[in-house]
Amino acid sequence: MLRPLDRRQLIARLALVGLGGTGLGALTACQARHTHPQNARPTSHAMRYRNGAVAADHPLASEVGVDVLRAGGNAIDAAIAVNATLGVVRPYSCGLGGGGFLVAHDEKTGRSWAMNARETAPRGVWESYFTDLRSSGGPDGASRYGGHAVAVPGTPDGLFLAHRAHGTMPMSRLLAPAAELARHGFEADASHVGAVESLAGVRRRLPWTKTISQWTWRQWCHEGTVTVGSKLSNEALAETLETLGRKGIEAWRTGPIPEGLSRIARASGGKLNVDSIAEYRADEIEPLTLKNRFFGDTIITMPPPSSGGIAIAQILATYERLLKAAGNPPLESTQGRHLLIEAMKPAFALRARYLADPAFAPVPIDRLLDEALVESMTAKIDPNRARTAEEIGEGLQLPDDEGTSHLCVIDGQRRAVAWTSTINGTFGSLVGDPESGVLLNNEMDDFTTIQGEANLYGLRQSDWNLPVPGKRPLSSMSPTILLNDRGSIEAIAGASGGPRIISATLQVLLGMRYGDLDAASAIDRPRVHHQWLPDSIRYEDDEALEGPGWRAPLEAMGHTFDQAPRGVAVVQAIRVHSDGFDPASDPRKLGVAAGY
Ligand code: DON
């Protein structure tokens, strides 16, 4: 048996080979490659905190959150400070130029709350925008890089909405640690160096991106010379954060900040405009709550425009039935893995067909969560054989008469927050504004950009997800909270990693609740992912950890594995035990959790 720390170091080392791109020459914000396992400091293995805990994917961000809790802030205050800090110390993953989803629950009042701060398509785009761009000779990869890829950011309004709704400390205080780090700097870790290498690869493959990524390349990559320990700072971003702290959200909606962002995006052809930035509003929404849906637990998670909540609920409900029918095999057994992968396939096929922004498309949420559908999905799964993508696609119809950094916080009053934020790909659109220091997202690629073509994550999506001004692109972000049958918080989780967010979040929840693992062990376990198409299992190589040969019996059942192992997302989680909070951050991205 490996001791926990050895095991976590090994995972960080394996992540070096494990977190490659999608095979499409693509960059994704969670996929920074890690090179120095010795950088992975001991985490919270077996730690129990009584007063509060934070699991973010950068140690400085977790510490900022705990400082806010210690100073008397609640979980939302801490989450705001952590989110803003992540936008500085993980600039290739999230930030003011991106968007996100938040799910919160207050155990004392029994009330849940969710926030939709997803980016929107700007005024001036239309459904065939990217197809037309291609036929008129637009740049290769226009939905991924440069101004065309940029959607209207949602995170700034989200920070202020969360604060108005539940914050208690002044916004200037909550944004101050992020501003401080932006001004005085922090050290690059191996994850950052991996992101720099990824961007260097894009600039080599698509030379036209050299011009549009100039600021990002200089500011956050030091022209490719960043190494572990290099000092990174961003004075302009520090000033933007301080301005927002002093003047409020109005400073984002009108004036030099939106003017600069719009100018820089439009310089490479995009449609981002000051009106769209001014009219953007994050929404307070009801989370998707599924009572007693998973081994008796209640799942509180994100509804559309995320596909994550629905997919997690479908997969867990299907998998629970399959596990029971198979006599509760261990998750790591051939049977356990086979059933999980088979449960993933139809959920992702349904995602491809039915999911989009419900404000613009008739998403049949109730029918997608109907017990009868789960029963029929379960009944079609063969306990001994892998089904092909065609088989799943064909049999899959709803009845005709019916339709990137993640953070977790819990405070001493048992208020829990799960918040996933994204700029989509690594360094988003690559376009950043020197005046405000803000890097802009490439969330337009989460729309169905060219009909019939897969996106950055190999996902095929329906026409319901075509871009329209004001519409939010379909997402996989899945901030999730689990309550037990007495209504007590059991677990908080979420991830970065495109569609792998869904499979990784649910595997960590399974590890904690079905496998009874502490949060770090549940996160450390190797994961699998199947998204219907491509019809192949993405996997983390656990031969070194669990013994060789685990894939052969699955191959004999008809499963196909990717040619090489790659990372399956980056998860942060907190498990609540009777003797305290147990937070853990993913060693795959060198995160370290904190508590007190
Ligand atoms: O919303 C989504 O589903 C994607 N924009 C998430 C991207 C992501 O997790 C990047 N990390 N690898």
Image (tube, rainbow, N blue to C red):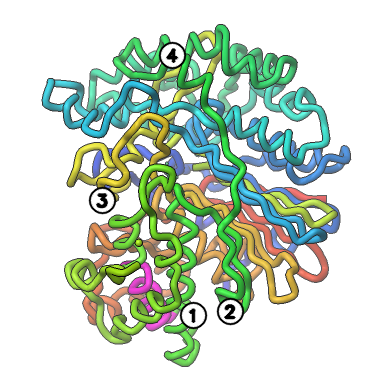
Q: Is residue 102 above or below residue 224?
A: below
- Residue contact at pointers 1 and 2, CB within 8 angstroms: yes
Q: Return the disc, 2 or 4, that comes first in the chain's sequence.
A: 4
Residue bounds of the magenta highlight: 333-345
Type of amino acid at the residue the image marks with label 2: Phe
Q: Return the disc, 3 or 4, that comes first in the chain's sequence.
A: 4
Given the current orientation, which residue lies at the most extreme front position?
401
Q: Look at the numbered disc 4 and say if its residue's Cβ is closer than 8 Å to ligand 1.
A: no
Identify the residue under disc 3. Answer: 460
Where does the image place residue 24, in percent across and percent down from the top left? 24, 42
- In the structure shown, which secondary structural element does the residue marked by tag 3 occupy? loop
Q: Is residue 223 magenta?
A: no
Q: Residue at x 29, y 78 (%)?
A: 554
Q: Is residue 228 at all visible to an observer of this figure?
A: no
Identify the residue under disc 1. Answer: 320
Q: Return the disc, 3 or 1, that comes first in the chain's sequence.
A: 1
